[in-house]
């Protein structure tokens, strides 16, 4: 498959937004931020699309990577993908659960439920994305014809609408899966039909997003407006990165590193966000700029350092990519005959 550098850049951008969003959400209740409403407004502005870009990208890659695989290879790669999502899910859900139990007096939201509840009922923090993506990867079939592509899109849209009326119940994991099937399917359809947004699409998408966001803040919001905002936000940044940020960065460029270690950053950033916030507060540092700068530095670049170390100490990399460790163990076993 030809490498889509714009997609790498888009995922890195979404990863940065996720880190910023979680960082600010942790700081808003902990610090007396200047013009706090503006920080909250920014968080709301990006929360309609930043994580959902990941679902789009995952669907896009699913279509491009899995399209022409033989049946056996297809199911094997699908199983590997699910394994690489579920193992980190359970490991880091456990870490976050016990952090919130042990440091309940220092974190913003202490854990009051059992670990089983965190696993199977209400995932902690950003962990919901991993379990939802694993289930979606399991459920979504390959698209082999235009008809199948249209059916997939329609079915996922219907499920999205039904889910908005809680017709599938209120279970958090089920709701997240049903809500994000359409974003994943959108990525599949974008890749299958080889769509390329051109001309002045950014005008409609960008201005439409801002206008609807303002309307929602001033007037009212509902499931329809939120869904349209997600759709516009995803496609706007797909357009920007596909047309204006189509760049192959050098090996050690920060964007390249963020794209390469995106999974590790996603898993580690809330731990480092909470850690540095607690430390700074303990030593009496309340300056919001220092908190944001140090939070971003630890969340992104310290996470990358940890990821590189764990690559060298490869057995520990099982918490990020278990399939790679299993493959290396298999290759290290002497073959008979």
Image (cartoon, helix red, strand yellow):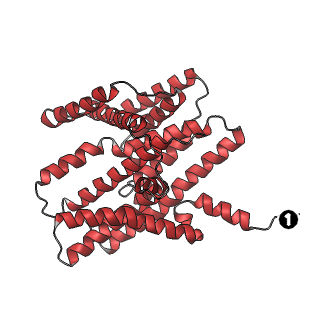
Say which of 283 and 302 sits in front.
302
Residue 238 image point, x, y percent = 40, 36
Mark 1 lies on a secondary structure that is loop
Image position of 160 with respect to 251: above or below: above
Say which of 87 and 194 sits in front.
194
Q: Residue at x 32, y 30 (%)?
A: 202
Tell me the quarter of the image containing the N terminus: top right
Tell me the quarter of the image containing the C terminus: bottom right
Q: Residue at x 62, y 35 (%)?
A: 67
Residue sitting farthest toward the right: 337
Mark 1 surroundings: few (<14), some (14-19) or many (≥20) residues within 10 A: few
Residue sitting farthest toward the left: 35
Image position of 107 with respect to 5: above or below: below
Residue 205 image point, x, y percent = 30, 29
Residue wearing tag 1: 336
Residue 227 image point, x, y percent = 32, 33
Residue 148 image point, x, y percent = 56, 24
């Amino acid at each position: 498959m030809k490498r889509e550098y714009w997609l790498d850049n888009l995922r890195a951008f979404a990863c940065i937004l996720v880190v910023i969003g979680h960082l600010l959400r942790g700081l808003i209740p902990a610090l007396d931020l200047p013009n706090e409403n503006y920080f909250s407004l920014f968080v709301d502005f990006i929360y309609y699309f930043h994580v959902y870009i990941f679902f789009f990208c995952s669907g896009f890659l699913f279509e491009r990577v899995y399209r022409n695989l033989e049946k056996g290879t297809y199911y094997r790669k699908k199983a590997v993908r699910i394994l690489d999502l579920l193992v980190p899910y359970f490991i880091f859900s456990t870490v976050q659960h016990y952090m919130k139990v042990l440091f309940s007096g220092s974190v913003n939201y202490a854990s009051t439920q059992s670990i089983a509840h965190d696993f199977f009922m209400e995932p902690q923090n950003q962990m919901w994305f991993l379990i939802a993506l694993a289930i979606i990867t399991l459920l979504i079939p390959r698209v082999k014809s235009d008809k199948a592509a249209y059916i997939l899109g329609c079915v996922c849209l219907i499920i999205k609408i039904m889910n908005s009326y809680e017709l599938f119940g209120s279970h958090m994991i089920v709701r997240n899966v049903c809500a994000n099937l359409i974003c994943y399917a959108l990525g599949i359809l974008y890749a299958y039909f080889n769509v390329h947004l051109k001309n002045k699409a950014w005008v409609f998408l960008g201005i439409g997003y801002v206008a609807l966001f303002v309307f929602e803040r001033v007037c009212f919001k509902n499931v329809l407006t939120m869904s349209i905002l997600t759709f516009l936000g995803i496609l706007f940044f797909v357009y920007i990165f596909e047309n204006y940020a189509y760049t192959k960065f050098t090996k050690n460029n920060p964007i390249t590193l963020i794209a390469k270690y995106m999974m590790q950053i996603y898993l580690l950033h809330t731990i480092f966000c909470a850690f540095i916030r607690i430390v700074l507060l303990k030593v009496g540092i309340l300056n919001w700029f220092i908190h944001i700068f140090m939070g971003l530095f630890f969340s992104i670049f310290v996470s990358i350092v940890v990821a590189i170390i764990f690559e060298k100490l490869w057995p520990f990399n099982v918490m990020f990519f278990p399939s790679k460790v299993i493959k290396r163990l298999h290759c290290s076993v002497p073959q008979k005959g």
